[in-house]
Amino acid sequence: MHIVEHLIAGRWSAGGDVSTVIGPHAGAPVANFPAATPHEVAAAVAGARAAQPDWAATAPAARADALRAAATAVEQATGELARTMSAEMGKPEAEAAGSIAAGVGTLRQYAELGQLHAGRTLAGDLGATDLMVREPRGVVAAITPWNDPVAISCGLLGAALVTGNAAVSKPSERTPATGWLLTRTLAPHFPPGVLSMLAGGAPTGAALAESAVDVVAHVGSTATGRAIAAAAARTGAKALLENGGCDPLIIDTGVDPAWAAQQAALGAFANAGQICVAVERIYVHADVAEEFLAALVKEAAAFEIGPLVDLRHRSAVHGQVVDAVDRGARILTGGTIPEGPGAWYPPTVLTDCTDEMRVVETETFGPVAPVVTVASFDEALSRATRSPYGLAATVLTPSMSNAHRAWRQLETGTVKINAVFGGAPGGAAHPRRGSGQGFGYGPELLDEMTATKVVHLESPPGGW
Ligand code: NAD
């Protein structure tokens, strides 16, 4: 059982009401964590504010060295971090270790890219010097979710710290011990106060978003992102939002149905569907629908997943399935809550779905594949585009002209053709609509964490 503490201005402490994380595998307690009060939030932000100028004045190469050393420490702590992440949110330990390796890789990338992240000189009057310089924004609040807690935190914190900001991390109340272990591993590599951590849930996050920070970076649900954007509008902080999605998968005529089913299962069921870019709705061409559905049912039966994060989330996922059935969907496999402890839920395939069902219209964030049969590729494209979200989309098609049309027409940050996951390193997109704003990852996150200043430098008349 972990006992989580806050890190405020370089000191560990445990104020606030205590809650317990119940593990989703067997329903046993995993961690106790306190909820930081508004007073503690203010103290962490003040500590960060006090520590930031010296950190900003530290040579970029020295900041990069600190981040590199922190990355190695996280790598060495992989075993304990993976066990804790798995116990708190259900991801199998081997997958948790893989996502920690991704976080370590991100820290190392930012260590290298951070010291190269510079401005430029302008072609001005020869009697003057004109520059565009990058400066840290100041104090960055990083408010993060539970579904990939280490990799996401490493991205935001790495980019914030290497560019000379101080950071206040607020991990999810569903993975507080993972966030606390990560902070314990990272913090010794930075001067006291440069990295702080506050445990707690929505009220702590809201207090941090309302506080005197310069950037609020949030990865999480759309509803929370909107509340944070409103808070940032009041304080003048910059809001950086990577929020929910309801990603479509379009399956064109002429596609091998067995392969399409493998892709659909991977997209919908990996991490028990708890991935921001999971496949949330499937539009399949009538020509291949029957064979595709039969193959998808087989894939679902063979797909091994961990439990959902907790019972509350399982009820929400199951509620969407029940709502769809009430409105005419048919369950082809799964769709029932298993007996016994834990938050398990089976890979589920629904057919006869319509766009009006909640399971199609909004994010489910569970192992559910709702299938809509369409008469044409064009119909699939226009229905896929009609969405309050704009995170990512996948198209499976043998037609190059349909592929070209699709990537131009889909109004999402990311479009993947003929592979449900994948993409080159360094690819970063702008999410659209309810899916957020700004670059939440990739080299461009360094731009978000800094402010550009234009300098015009001229000698005074008669000066020397
Ligand atoms: P969430 O928004 O409920 O919680 C995320 C963080 O926000 C937590 O730390 C939480 O305590 C905090 N929070 C909650 N209410 C708040 C408030 N009013 N003010 C300030 N902070 C508040 O999201 P979640 O359930 O933890 O995560 C799942 C969601 O995250 C899904 O919607 C998923 O799509 C999204 N997600 C998006 C990406 C992406 O890159 N776009 C990546 C991972 C997860």
Image (cartoon, rainbow, N blue to C red):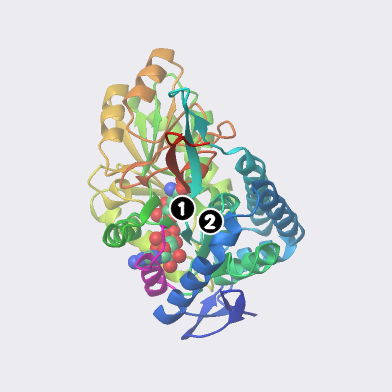
Within-10-Å neighbours for mark 1: few <14, some 14–19, many 20+ = many
Foreground residue among 338 and 157: 157
Query: What residue lies at 41% left-to-right and 63% top-to-bottom?
Result: 213
User: Residue 247, can we see it?
Assistant: yes
Residue highlighted by disc 2? 165
Amino acid type of the residue that numbered disc 1 sits on in the rendered structure: Arg
Within-10-Å neighbours for mark 2: few <14, some 14–19, many 20+ = many
Residue highlighted by disc 1? 137
Image coords of residue 139 (percent x, y): 47, 60
Q: Is residue 73 left or right of residue 162?
A: right
Ligand 1 shows up in the quarter that is bottom left
Foreground residue among 189 and 55: 55
101 to 385, vertically: above or below: below
Q: Earlier in the sequence, mark 1 or mark 2?
A: 1
What are the residue bounds of the magenta stretch?
Answer: 201-214
Where, by quadrant of the figure, is residue 391 drawn? top left
Q: Secondary structure at mark 1?
A: loop
Amino acid type of the residue that numbered disc 2 sits on in the rendered structure: Asn
Image coords of residue 435 (percent x, y): 35, 46
Farthest front residue in view: 462
Give yes or no for residue 20 being in the magenta stretch. no
Determine whether label 1 and label 2 are within 8 Å by CB: yes
Farthest right residue in view: 76
Q: CA distance from mark 1 to mark 2?
A: 6 Å
Foreground residue among 55 and 95: 55
Query: What residue lies at 47% left-to-right and 26% top-to-bottom?
Result: 127
